[in-house]
Image: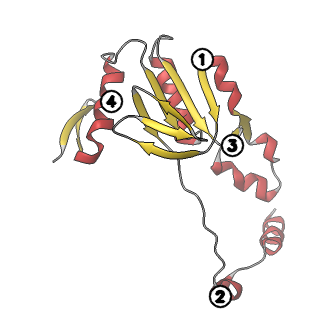
Amino acid sequence: MSGLYTNQQSSRLVDVPSDLKPLAESAAALESGSAVVGESILILGGGTGGVVAANALRNRLSRDHRIVVVEREPSFALAASFLWVMTGDRTPSQVSRPLERLQRKGIEVVRGEVERIDSERREAVVDGRPLCGGRLIVTLGAEFALTPRPTWRRRARPSNTTRRRVRRRR
């Protein structure tokens, strides 16, 4: 069963599938200010989704709310900027930022691997240690599984060929 929720930015009703209903209710409660004061919000994933969510929540909620971002990597890198690194227009350090910078805004950062998620209890096990929040946001992204395939050798081109093509276009 679906539920209808108001999109705060456009003030229109949005149909939300039943499996996403708890998340929609949590977001609506946070945006309306009806969330419990001093509540802890656990954000799993420090990529684009996690960093944007953490910053948006910190801007909207009082410092009574504890915001915790869990990420295994020490820094955030915007994937869209990797093209600049591949073409030599930027270095990796120019397109990434340490996640520790979030601490200046009052956002806690926990480094570790998420091993298990219990959405009903709003809990995650990170490097063997349970972390719990009043709200849970999961933005873990995708992990590439680059298992070699026989057809890749026939179709794949070496990256240096692509670099030469990019240089020729300049």
Q: Which residue is mark 1?
A: 106
Q: CA distance from mark 1 to mark 3?
A: 19 Å
- Residues 120 and 75: in front is 120
Q: Earlier in the sequence, mark 4 or mark 1?
A: 4
State the image quarter where residue 117 is shown: top left
Q: Earlier in the sequence, mark 4 or mark 2?
A: 4
Residue at image x 67%, y 18%? Answer: 104
Q: CA distance from mark 4 to mark 1?
A: 21 Å
Q: Which residue is mark 4?
A: 26
Q: CA distance from mark 4 to mark 3?
A: 27 Å
Amino acid type shown at disc 4: Ser
Q: CA distance from mark 3 to mark 2?
A: 32 Å
Q: Residues within 10 Å of mark 2 (few under 14, many from 20)?
A: few
Q: Which residue is mark 2?
A: 150
Residue at image x 69%, y 89%? Answer: 154
Callout 2 secondary element:
helix
Q: Which residue is mark 3?
A: 73
Taking 160 as reference, is 20 left or right? left
Amino acid type shown at disc 1: Gly
Q: Residue furthest front?
A: 128
In this rendering, the answer to whether 31 lies above or below 89 is above
- Residue 47 position within the rendered picture, expressed as x and y whole percent measured from the top left: 59, 42
Callout 4 secondary element:
helix
Answer yes or no: do the residues labelled 4 and 1 have beta carbons within 8 Å? no
Q: CA distance from mark 1 to mark 2?
A: 49 Å
- Residue 156 position within the rendered picture, expressed as x and y whole percent measured from the top left: 70, 80
